Image (cartoon, coloured by chain):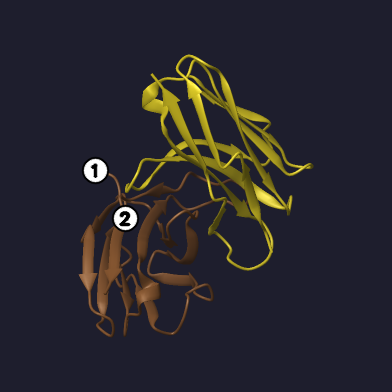
Amino acid sequence: KQEVTQIPAALSVPEGENLVLNCSFTDSAIYNLQWFRQDPGKGLTSLLLIQSSQREQTSGRLNASLDKSSGRSTLYIAASQPGDSATYLCAVRQSTGGGADGLTFGKGTHLIIQP
Amino acid sequence: DTGVSQNPRHKITKRGQNVTFRCDPISEHNRLYWYRQTLGQGPEFLTYFQNEAQLEKSRLLSDRFSAERPKGSFSTLEIQRTEQGDSAMYLCASSPRTSGAFSYEQYFGPGTRLTVT
């Protein structure tokens, strides 16, 4: 059974710092990995999608990398801003086993950017 | 395109009552997914549809849970005889049809928060 782990569970940094969020998964047989942002009491906003054949994706101040063989992904946030405060979730789409198209999520990293 | 919408946004019900949630996906998205999220956890996959066909339902939490997508457009998730443990956020997502190993992003709605008293 696929398990997704996100470290750290919580992070608080001053505004302007660069930071890295980590995601690991136990089964490397994935089609893709997706990073989301979730604000309190809200739904999920997709940030980046990395196909299994790709190594990284970039969008603005965000860069996500994928090392499928080692079961790891990182989300790099440059020049953090208070508006980046949210919970960041990592999810994988399995290529084997049951559940076909459903995503398996980690518990998230709760990020606070101090003004 | 207004994105994925869900109704109601909040639902409070008494234990033992039935509840139904609605999800309207992004137009022309073939795939529609349901997830449940409890406090402090990531979303948990429940079921999904391709058009009107329900392709995976083994992850539904019990036989009290059922979902439909009768015309391949909107979907409903019903919980019968609700229990306090059903209190959670129920999230819907949609995506275009995948093509083998290539996948599109799943786009999520705002969720329906269920409270069972």
The colour chain A appears in is yellow
Looking at the image, can residue B74 be seen? Answer: no
In the picture, which chain is brown?
A: B
Q: Residue at x 53, y 33 (%)?
A: A11
Q: As rendered, which of A42 and A30 lies closer to the eye?
A: A42
- Upstream in sequence: badge 1 or badge 2: 1
How far from the left and from the top, in percent, is residue B67? Answer: 36, 74
Q: Which residue is mark 2?
A: B111
Mark 1 and mark 2 on one chain: yes
How far from the left and from the top, in percent, is residue A80? Answer: 47, 20
* Residue B80 sits above or below residue B36 on the image: below
How far from the left and from the top, in percent, is residue B28? Answer: 33, 51
Image mark for residue B2: 1
Q: Chain of mark 2?
A: B
Q: Secondary structure at mark 1?
A: loop
Q: Residue at x 35, y 60 (%)?
A: B89
How far from the left and from the top, in percent, is residue B80? Answer: 32, 83
Characterize the local packing of mark 1: few (<14), some (14-19) or many (20 or more) Cα atoms within 10 angstroms.
few
Q: Secondary structure at mark 2?
A: loop
* Residue A46 sits above or below residue B50 on the image: above
Q: Chain of mark 1?
A: B
Q: Residue at x 49, y 74 (%)?
A: B57
Image mark for residue A34: none
Q: Quadrant of the C terminus of chain A?
A: top left
